[in-house]
Image (cartoon, rainbow, N blue to C red):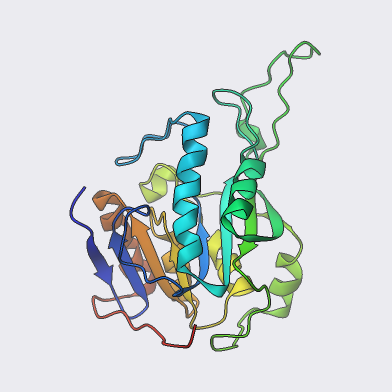
Amino acid sequence: MTKPRIFFESNTVKLLNDDVITTTLIENGSIDLIVTSPPYNVDIQYNSHKDDLTYSEYLEFSRKWMSRCFEWLKDEGRFCLNVPLDKNKGGQQSVGADITTIAKQLGFQYHSTIIWNEGNISRRTAWGSWMSASAPFVIAPVELIIVLYKKRWKKNGGSGVSDITKTEFMDWTNGVWAFSGESKKKIGHPAPFPIELPRRCIKLFSFVGDVVLDPFSGSGSTVIAAALNKRLGVGIEIDEKYCELSRKRIINLTSASQEPFKLMVESK
């Protein structure tokens, strides 16, 4: 990995080439909303991350990076965490429940869980004991978006300006979301998530002008959604190649150009 640095910045986006565990480039108490999808530990071939830890190692890794997020959030800060409901690769594990428990141990308050139905049941290949009670697999083709907050759920700081429509509010406060995932081949990243996911979280849980962080920025979906919806996006990505992929997507999708990041200053 290269020396930690600001890889790209525009007036609405800052992309950091750094490690979420060790970075010193994010100020404590500076973030309004975190929207992220961390590695799932299912042996995806990332360039710069080992994705086949033991389950106990994975939970310890989760504890470390989530503790950083807790420090970075404002007291009214929210945290939207996209994780699997469970996993069966390498043994059945209650991923969503275990990560929620760790988050609460770190001090996060629990608000709710959104069920994301990607509609991918047609790609299912594992059935266990076919048409037999001996050892069937029960697999829910959904993921979770766990909604947490730091100290206070009611949000009084920031601009106070919401840009969500009536239809969006009615649809998205129903905690089952149905939209497709993102194509690895199209994006050029082994585990991209669609811009629609952070877009909904950003409009539902933050005000216009808020600072939105993704500590596993990957292909840049969260910071792009932030910029397109009049928020300030900050992304941390350990891999330089994925930073370059993000930079290209940011420029192509938001018409951003290289210039100083303009952070709105307010009392914390």
Outermost residue on the left side: it is: 3
- Relative placement, left or right, of 181 versus 135 is left
- Relative placement, left or right, of 10 versus 59 is left
Q: Is residue 43 above or below residue 246?
A: above
Outermost residue on the right side: it is: 133
* The quadrant where residue 89 appears: top right
Residue pictured at 60% horizontal, 88% vertical: 160
Camera-side residue of 106 and 130: 106
Tally of marks? 0
Camera-side residue of 64 and 185: 64
* The quadrant where residue 111 appears: bottom right
Q: Position of residue 181 (x, y in %)?
A: 55, 49
Residue pictured at 81% horizontal, 13% vertical: 133
Camera-side residue of 67 and 240: 67
Q: Position of residue 48 (x, y in %)?
A: 30, 42
Q: Is residue 49 above or below residue 67?
A: above
For the question of whether residue 208 can be seen, the reply is yes
Q: Position of residue 67 (x, y in %)?
A: 48, 56
- Relative placement, left or right, of 131 versus 251 is right
Q: Is residue 32 above or below residue 20?
A: below
Camera-side residue of 137 and 118: 137
Residue pictured at 63% horizontal, 22% vertical: 126
Q: Position of residue 170 (x, y in %)?
A: 76, 71
For the question of whether residue 118 can be seen, the reply is no
Q: Is residue 170 above or below residue 19?
A: below
- Relative placement, left or right, of 55 versus 19 is right
